[in-house]
Image: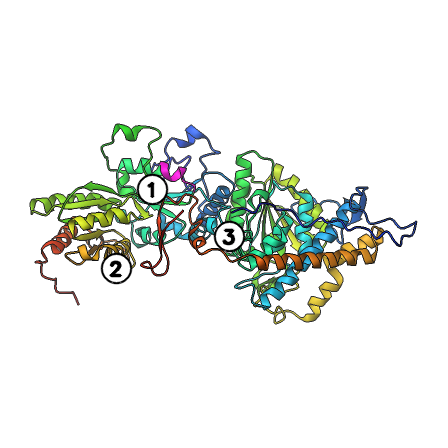
Amino acid sequence: MGEEVGEYQGAYKITKGLLDKYGPERVVDTPITEAGFAGIGVGSAYHGLRPVIEFMTFNFSMQAIDHIINSAAKSNYMSAGQINVPIVFRGPNGPAAGVGAQHSQCYAAWYGSVPGLKVLVPYSSEDARGLLKAAIRDPDPVVFLENELLYGESFPVSAEALDSSFCLPIGKAKIEREGKDITITAFSKMVGYALKAAEILEKEGISAEVINLRSIRPLDRATINASVRKTNRLLTVEEGFPQHGVGAEICASVVEDSFGYLDAPVERIAGADVPTPYAANLERMAFPQIEDIVRAAKRACHRSVPMAATAS
Amino acid sequence: MALAHRSSGLLKPLSTASSSSFLHRRPYSTDDTTTITVETSVPFTGHNCETPSRSVDTNPKELMTFFTDMALMRRMEIAADSLYKSKLIRGFCHLYDGQEAVSIGMEAAITKKDCIITAYRDHCLFLGRGGTLLESFAELMGRTAGCSNGKGGSMHFYKKEACFFGGHGIVGAQVPLGCGLAFAQKYRKEGHVTFTMYGDGAANQGQLFEALNMAALWDLPAILVCENNHYGMGTAEWRAAKSPAYYKRGDYVPGLKVDGMDAFAVKQACKFAKEHVLKNGPIILEMDTYRYHGHSMSDPGSTYRTRDEISGVRQERDPIERIRKLILAHDLATEKELKDIEKQARKEVDEAIAKAKESPMPDEPELFTNVYRKGFGVESFGADRKELRTTLP
């Protein structure tokens, strides 16, 4: 259910063909009324349906956030288990390209902080398929944060992933690339950037382990900590605003559980602490680039890069 | 975790006094279903809608049930007032006394497969759906025997098996949720309907109009019931709504204005509405009702309305008094028998409170239960995660 999911075939073509295949009872075009249709979705989940609610982007989810949090996330708890809410809220999250301040925010940290929600962040095609199926089958509310630019990227896909029942476990991160000198955590589009950064670092003698989080809540602290205990260094990467971000939580978690293993302070790469500008050069500065990841990784490894003189 | 027995305490016939009996007086009966026809207090007013007849069929059994059930609801709310003042109930407590006819009349017109959803003034609606006094008082006092195991509180009563979906604290949120329940009912071709209840305060919420638009577009079996008690917290309806004719606010959606203090008017309107929505999509019912208490226990309820107004309504329009007069007029029971029913209600309430007080507060591990339906062995933390760290069940 969502805006343009049916006859328009999906604003980003994700639901293309579904109306013809499943009919208008199951693929429902809504008016531009997020609070209304998110609430209707949650209500139908109360009564046993398994709705998938699309937000054209998660920026618009703020219109409906009361239903996601107060009507969906907390219901099983407040009703002592009587009312579970098997709903999925999905759509593109984070920046696209040149869409400006109101259309570029990443909501991983906001939704990731709410008990009662599960928050998933696919990177590859296998992630998207396996995590979405797991999300729909899950009896709890899931916020599924996709990425508009990743929609256009191709990934190799295993035969296993093509199976119609392919599911990935919720709450488990994936080690995309093994390494021994530094752990880099990332999610969504930043996984690709981290992998490219890892190739560059390899040539400079730094072996980076790249973790694709896949799940913001539950956060796979076990995998992250095990990796840091091996590499002794941590760099977190995200596109969202830096204050109270996903990286802040990962840093705190590692400091709490694996302090003795850290050989360097935890480094964070995140979106700039500004609303997103439109001009292409400024937008580029507003989000992490591969060179930012490389630089921060080197800092954690050698600590020989002098601290940049801070701008006024 | 579920309680083993959920007996409705609502229908408990009194044993008739056999000692003094006049041959011409009919003994109080709980089974008599001979039809009696009553007239509603006022005619219905329609908006884009035919109005149902003022003549409502009932019978002695129903009349006595109405009286008994409303007496119990009234007693429960008054007792909750005392418990709150004794600090046994904490936080928010929104009482329904005065509005009982809406719950009672509605239940008489529908089944337990029709859904009801409301906001936070939910104690009596819970009872109407078959909830027990014990579950209610225990929940209010935060004990495990409560309907939400003590984890919800006054605003979060639910009874899923009776299609009662709460119990919501955010004003207006329950309206799209109720339209969602109706969506599911239509999707499954159930032939049941949803009554989604809100107040005159919530009637101005944007999400209500969003949901109503979709309900009308998709012909959902949703009945929007505005319990207009004329005050949104401390703000009188004429100060909050440019048009306080809430039954007309649906514009293209038909509406009916109903005397919410008259259980038979409510019953007739709900019956009419149920038939209507199954064929024609949503309808709005505006119940003209009144709450004797303030908005909540923190509100004395007399700074924005006069004591004369409150006592005036109590004298002229009290829903229980209306039924009492009907029962006496039809000679279905004596005044003493009715007083005995009220005494019995008081006794049941007192017993339920005593039993609820015996129920313990939830065990500490309950802090972490029901966060998810499927916990995956996920970690969770207390305030000091070095001290309290657990795996979700």
Q: Position of residue B325 (x, y in %)?
A: 80, 56
Q: Would you call the spot at circle 1 few (<14 residues within 10 Å), some (14-19), or many (20 or more)?
A: many
Parent chain of label 3: B
Residue shown at the point (36%, 45%) measured from the top left: B377
Q: Amino acid at mark 2?
A: Asp
Q: Position of residue A275 (x, y in %)?
A: 28, 57
Mark 2 and 1 residues: CB-CB less than 8 Å, in contact? no
- Quadrant for residue B73, please give it: bottom right
A138 part of magenta stretch: yes
Q: Amino acid at mark 3?
A: Ala
Figure quadrant of the N terminus of chain A: top left
Q: Position of residue A282 (x, y in %)?
A: 21, 55
Q: A188 left or right of B189?
A: left
Parent chain of label 2: A
Question: Disc 2 or 1, which lies upstream in sequence?
Answer: 1
Front of the two marks 3 and 1: 1
Q: Position of residue B309 (x, y in %)?
A: 69, 67
Q: A255 left or right of B186?
A: left
**Residue indicated by mark 1:** A170
- Quadrant for residue A286, please give it: bottom left
Residue shown at the point (49%, 34%) measured from the top left: A25
Figure quadrant of the C terminus of chain A: bottom left
Instruction: Report whether residue B44 is seen.
Output: no
Residue closer to the observer: B19 or B244: B19
Front of the two marks 2 and 1: 1
The secondary structure type at the circle numbered 1 is: loop
- Quadrant for residue A178, please give it: top left
B169 part of magenta stretch: no
**Residue indicated by mark 3:** B173
Q: B377 left or right of A233?
A: right
**Residue indicated by mark 2:** A273
Which residues are the magenta region?
Answer: A133-139
